[in-house]
Image (cartoon, grey):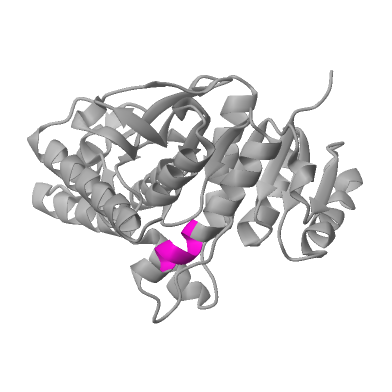
Amino acid sequence: MSRKKIALIGGGQIGGVLAQLAALRQLGDVVLFDIVQDMPVGKTLDIAEASRIDGFDSHLKGTSDYKDIENADIIIVTAGLPRKPGMSRDDLLTTNAAIIKSVAENVKQYAPNAICIIISNPLDAMVTLFKKVTGFPANRVMGQSGVLDSSRFSSFIAWELGVSVKDVNAMVLGGHGDTMVPLVRYANVNGIPAMEMIEKKYNDATKAKEVMTKIVDRTKQAGGEVVKLLKTGSAFYSPATAAIQMAEAILNDEKRLLPVCALLNGEYGCNGYYVGVPAILGANGVEGIFEVTLNNEEKALMDNSVKAVTNLVADMERLGL
């Protein structure tokens, strides 16, 4: 049986980690594309030369020719520039929209049946644009944000409580930005509410709320925290790992319920926009969206996040993108 084909568009830091993880987990053969000549060839060669040590047989190919992504089963897009000092949001939108348009046109030509995962920022707008250019059905175009944000949220809770992060279940919904919605009420440690455990740790409900507020704020600012510390770049290990979890769920038809930036059609009171929600991922991509019951406070936060997404898309349209 032939291996699945995974095409990675963008050979930067995230693209390189994606290639390595896909090979290590033997998800399929990997093509790493970048417009910079030779660089993706060098990265894939470096990874492949460790195949004996790491014990994988996946074939890796670096390229600057879109034809090499032909008939890919999964495409993960990381292409685009990070926001730089002095660059406005409009500048970032304009620059990355041009890149995503080109990527989408080539994906449509060479891999018309692929399931596509977008990581490029500003995420919610770039997923929307990619879907518009390709015309692919909604189940085959999604964005990666919630898996990463939820992992960060879970990690911070685990560190606070001194428990294994394997036992923490926490989910973040909404847009990928400051308005994201970490669902505190649903966060738990193997079924025990996280807030209950924090309250018992401090024996003080008020203190527990303060601690959780700090965790939520850190989750929202987690990407910026890494950027500030790195000084010359942004997160790449965790975003790549999150995207690989999504790809693995699709390639292995796992039916995982994961927070995914998916196109909504009435769910959560939103219609026609890409927003982070719990979705079932399987062989057909997004196979279903689950509506979590939200209380009034959570619903207000979700509505605010959806509004931020609609404003971002409106800005993109205003710029003629």
Q: Is residue 102 left or right of residue 314?
A: right
Q: Residue furthest front?
A: 320
Question: Looking at the rendering, in which quadrant would you find the C terminus?
Answer: bottom left
Residue at point 14%, 36% (across, down): 299
What's drawn in magenta, residue-wise? Answer: 92-97
Residue at point 27%, 52% (across, down): 314
Residue at point 58%, 26% (across, down): 250
Question: Looking at the rendering, in which quadrant would you find the N terminus?
Answer: top right
What percent of the width, then of the height, locates residue 128? 41, 43
Q: Nearer the viewer, residue 35 or 249?
A: 35
What percent of the width, then of the height, locates residue 56? 84, 38
Is residue 143 visible to the viewer in this orientation of the structure? no
Q: Is residue 300 left or right of residue 166?
A: left
Give the main secondary structure, helix, strand or loop, of the magenta stretch.
helix
Q: Is residue 233 above or below residue 301?
A: below
Question: Would you say residue 93 sits in the magenta stretch?
Answer: yes
Q: Is residue 138 left or right of residue 292?
A: right
Q: Nearer the viewer, residue 23 or 91?
A: 91
What percent of the width, then of the height, locates residue 138? 45, 29
